[in-house]
């Protein structure tokens, strides 16, 4: 239960006013419940016409209280009082449920934003090496469980308080009777309290299988085109079905256990109450007191049942919190270092000095790489797949941290800068453009929120996207669909280029941006790149010869190392050079 109290203390520090209000309501409701239980005694005495010396002590106290307020003890007064108590108790209960739900969603918002922020403070390695199904599930389901967990914790404490108050009146009236009930009900229901290992195990399996379900769903939907192209729809649906079926099996067991504990305690508690009342009957306890105690027990039984259910739910949902915490810790361990120097402009270029980097558990992706990206020039990185080109770009953007060597930006180490201040001066076009399911305008403004209408059309013009945007049904207001699916590959790539250009970057990076395009689309992209050369510093990764033909300098990578460098013309004219062989082999 340490994890539970850690969660509770963390959230209590974050939302103290919410909880003070919540527990004030809980205390008020518990007090009203206790008074309603005590009010049963005078009702019983009046119905049996046991007044004066024959009435119980509680009835005498009620009579004095009513006289103080100028009323007399009769059936109408006590029924009105009892009915008013029940109504007030119900209204307080509604307000308390609202408070509980409000706290739950405030907790969810806080933890969602806080966790998302923690994730995005981490190196890109956290995402590239992480389990996407686990991450998505943590946001889509497990965070809801954590919020519910807190809901159950708050309700658990509320029920503890109510149960304590419900026991006070019976203890005062007949401590013997109350102790018999507690011992009897406790012995009968003892096995229900000892299921922590089972509930925790089922909760853990529930979280693990949910990760698999969400992972399968994410993978299936994002690969819809591939699945349909291979005619593997039935296989994809069956795979998702199998993962969901395994999750359902665990969920059914866990939820049945949680519900069953409450249902089983009700008869167990009732048996305990009946045994206690029978003993009171044998002892000759006054009927009014027996009625009050019995009423208190019957009000207490469902509260204890909810306590048991809350305990089961907390233990079962704790793995969700543990998974969330493990992801947060993993993100914190990979937190991206960021210096205090604000990047303003690329003046002296970007340099790699003997840089080596390897992904966890693998051999170096690049080793001893030294290169220079001069300002205002186009530099090309070429090489076969797996040679380390994209890794160089990722290190250039600070997405990964180098193992050894230096990456210098304007003569300073990259880590000395506020990395986002540098990235805000970069335009990046990946091989597979990531467009959003929003309008053309919103996709462009995402990169540069303050861009004017003129800036938008200028960027489209420079990216050779102006004509096709004008031809779209709603021009800039046209919705592109998920990942820009309503555009052709060439149109998506040109729009991605416009999105990079609109922020007027110092450094423009194209990571194999033309590798999957047709000749006409490639030609238009190439025209755009050529028109931008000299206005900004450009780094191009390319397989196609035409894309790097006008580059000022070329670095050829092979198995993570730079094997040659020089101008395109110089390297291509050397028959023994790697570049010339790649040209001949059409490896570019």
Image (cartoon, rainbow, N blue to C red):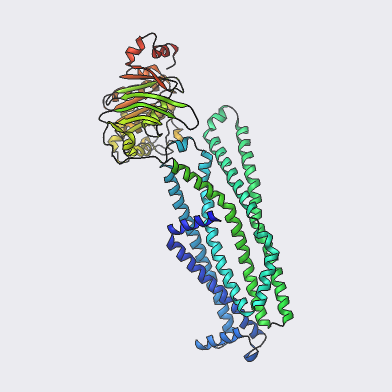
Residue 210: image x %, image y %?
58, 44
Residue 507: image x %, image y %?
31, 30
Image-quadrant location for residue 215: top right
| Count of numbered tags | 0
Image-quadrant location for residue 49: bottom right
Residue at 69 percent of width and 71 percent of height: 273
Pick the front one: 183 or 430: 183
Q: Relative to residue 213, is residue 511 depicted above or below? A: above
Pick the front one: 192 or 520: 192
Image-quadrant location for residue 173: bottom right
Q: Relative to residue 570, is residue 409 depicted above or below? A: below
Residue at 40 percent of width and 27 percent of height: 356
Residue 516: image x %, image y %?
44, 23
Answer yes or no: is residue 551 visible.
Answer: no
Q: Relative to residue 539, is residue 160 depicted above or below? A: below
Q: Residue furthest front?
A: 404
Residue at 59 percent of width and 72 percent of height: 166
Q: Residue furthest right?
A: 282
Q: Residue furthest bottom?
A: 53
Which quadrant, please, contains the N terminus? bottom right
Residue 557: image x %, image y %?
40, 20
Answer yes or no: is residue 162 visible.
Answer: yes
Which quadrant, please, contains the C terminus? top left
Pick the front one: 244 or 15: 15
Pick the front one: 154 or 360: 360
The answer to whether residue 193 is left or right of residue 31 is: right
Q: Residue furthest top?
A: 575
């Amino acid at each position: 239960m340490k994890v539970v109290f850690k969660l509770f203390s963390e959230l209590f520090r974050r939302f103290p006013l919410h909880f003070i209000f919540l527990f004030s309501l809980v205390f008020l409701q518990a007090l009203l419940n206790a008074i309603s239980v005590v009010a049963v005694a005078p009702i019983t005495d009046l119905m049996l016409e046991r007044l004066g010396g024959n009435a119980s002590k509680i009835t005498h106290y009620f009579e004095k209280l009513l006289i103080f307020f100028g009323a007399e003890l009769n059936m109408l007064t006590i029924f009105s009082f009892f009915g008013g108590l029940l109504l007030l108790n119900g209204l307080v209960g509604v307000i308390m449920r609202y408070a509980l739900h409000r706290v739950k969603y405030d907790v969810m918002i806080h933890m969602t934003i806080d966790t998302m922020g923690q994730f995005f403070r981490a190196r890109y390695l956290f995402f590239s090496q992480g389990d996407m199904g686990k991450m998505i599930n943590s946001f889509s389901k497990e965070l809801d469980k954590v919020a519910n967990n807190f809901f159950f914790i708050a309700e658990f404490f509320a029920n503890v308080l109510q149960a304590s108050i419900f026991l006070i009146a019976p203890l005062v009236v007949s401590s013997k009777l109350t102790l018999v009930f507690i011992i009897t009900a406790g012995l009968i229901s003892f096995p229900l309290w000892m299921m922590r290992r089972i509930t925790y195990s089922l909760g853990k399996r529930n979280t693990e299988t949910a990760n698999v379900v969400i992972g399968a769903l994410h993978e299936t939907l994002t690969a819809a085109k591939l699945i349909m192209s291979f005619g593997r729809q039935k296989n994809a649906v069956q795979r998702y079905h199998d993962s969901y079926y395994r999750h359902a099996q665990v969920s059914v067991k866990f939820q049945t256990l949680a519900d069953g504990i409450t249902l089983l305690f009700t008869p167990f508690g009732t048996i305990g109450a009946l045994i206690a009342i029978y003993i009171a009957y044998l002892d000759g306890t006054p009927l009014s007191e027996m009625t009050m105690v019995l009423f208190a027990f019957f009000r207490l039984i469902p509260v204890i049942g909810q306590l048991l259910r809350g305990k089961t739910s907390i233990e079962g949902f704790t793995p969700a919190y543990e998974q969330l915490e493990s992801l947060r810790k993993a993100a914190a361990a990979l937190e991206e270092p960021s210096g205090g120097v604000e990047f303003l402009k690329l003046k002296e270029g970007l340099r790699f000095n003997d840089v080596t980097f390897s992904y966890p558990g693998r051999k170096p992706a690049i080793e001893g790489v030294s290169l220079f990206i001069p300002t205002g020039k186009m530099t090309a990185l070429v090489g076969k797949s797996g040679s380390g080109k994209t890794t160089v770009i990722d290190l250039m953007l600070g997405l990964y941290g180098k193992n050894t060597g230096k990456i210098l930006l304007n003569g300073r180490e990259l880590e000395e800068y506020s990395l986002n201040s540098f990235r805000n001066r970069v335009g990046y076009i990946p091989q597979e453009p990531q467009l959003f399911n929003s309008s053309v305008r919103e996709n462009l403004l995402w990169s540069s929120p303050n861009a004017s209408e003129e800036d938008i059309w200028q960027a489209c013009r420079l990216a050779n996207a102006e004509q096709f945007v004008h031809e779209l049904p709603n021009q800039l207001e046209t919705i592109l669909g998920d990942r820009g699916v309503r555009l052709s590959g060439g149109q998506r790539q040109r729009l991605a280029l416009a999105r990079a250009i609109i922020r007027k970057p110092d450094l423009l990076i194209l990571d194999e941006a033309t590798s999957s395009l047709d000749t006409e689309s490639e030609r238009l992209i190439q025209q755009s790149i050529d028109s931008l050369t000299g206005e900004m510093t450009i780094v191009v990764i390319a397989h196609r010869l035409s894309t790097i033909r006008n580059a000022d300098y070329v670095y050829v990578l092979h198995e993570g190392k730079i094997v040659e460098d020089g101008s395109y013309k110089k390297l291509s004219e050397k028959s023994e050079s790697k570049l010339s062989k790649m040209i001949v082999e059409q490896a570019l």
